[in-house]
Image (cartoon, rainbow, N blue to C red):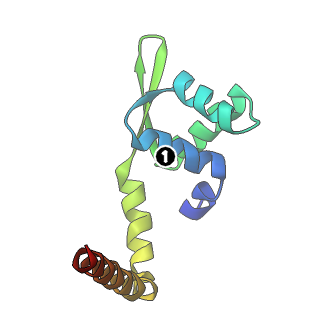
Amino acid sequence: MHAFDVLGDPVRRRILEILAEGEQAAGVIAAQVQREFPISQPAVSQHLKVLRDNGFATMRPDGQRRLYAVEPEALRDVDDWLDAFRQFWAPRLDALDTEIARGRRRRRKEQ
């Protein structure tokens, strides 16, 4: 499965956001996802499996629990692919930084 096929699903993206906060037990992940999406616990497990099978997450057993964590290497690969497209938004972000700085200077002068 291509990385963007994996990341194209909003549930899997949300799981990665949860995992970005640190290692989490499968039950904690399922509970959080089920509060936000109309999805069953087995469906959350399938999404975790897709993330694991495609290198976006790791799992380690801890007694009865299964602890999941982000696998940063897969995200680096996505970041590398996106690098060719940064030219389209980097100048706009730089211009935004400049405008924000101007606004701050203007507000300081007005005070």
Q: Quadrant of the N terminus?
A: bottom right
Q: Quadrant of the C terminus?
A: bottom left
- Taking the image as shown, residue 45 lies to the left or right of residue 38, namely left
| Residue kind at label 1, given as amino acid type | Glu
Say which residue appears at 71% left-offset and 34% top-offset.
43
- Taking the image as shown, residue 13 lies to the left or right of residue 99, namely right
Residue 16 picture location, percent across and down: 50, 46
Say which residue appears at 63% left-offset and 60% top-offset.
5
Residue 86 picture location, percent across and down: 41, 81
Residue 85, quarter of the rendered image? bottom left
Q: Nearer the viewer, residue 97 or 110?
A: 110
What residue is shown with label 1?
Answer: 17
Residue at the limit of the structure toward the right, as seen here: 38
Residue 98, quarter of the rendered image? bottom left
Residue 94 picture location, percent across and down: 33, 84
- Taking the image as shown, residue 109 lies to the left or right of residue 47, namely left
Say which residue appears at 39% left-offset and 39% top-offset.
21
Residue 17 picture location, percent across and down: 49, 46
Residue 42, quarter of the rendered image? top right
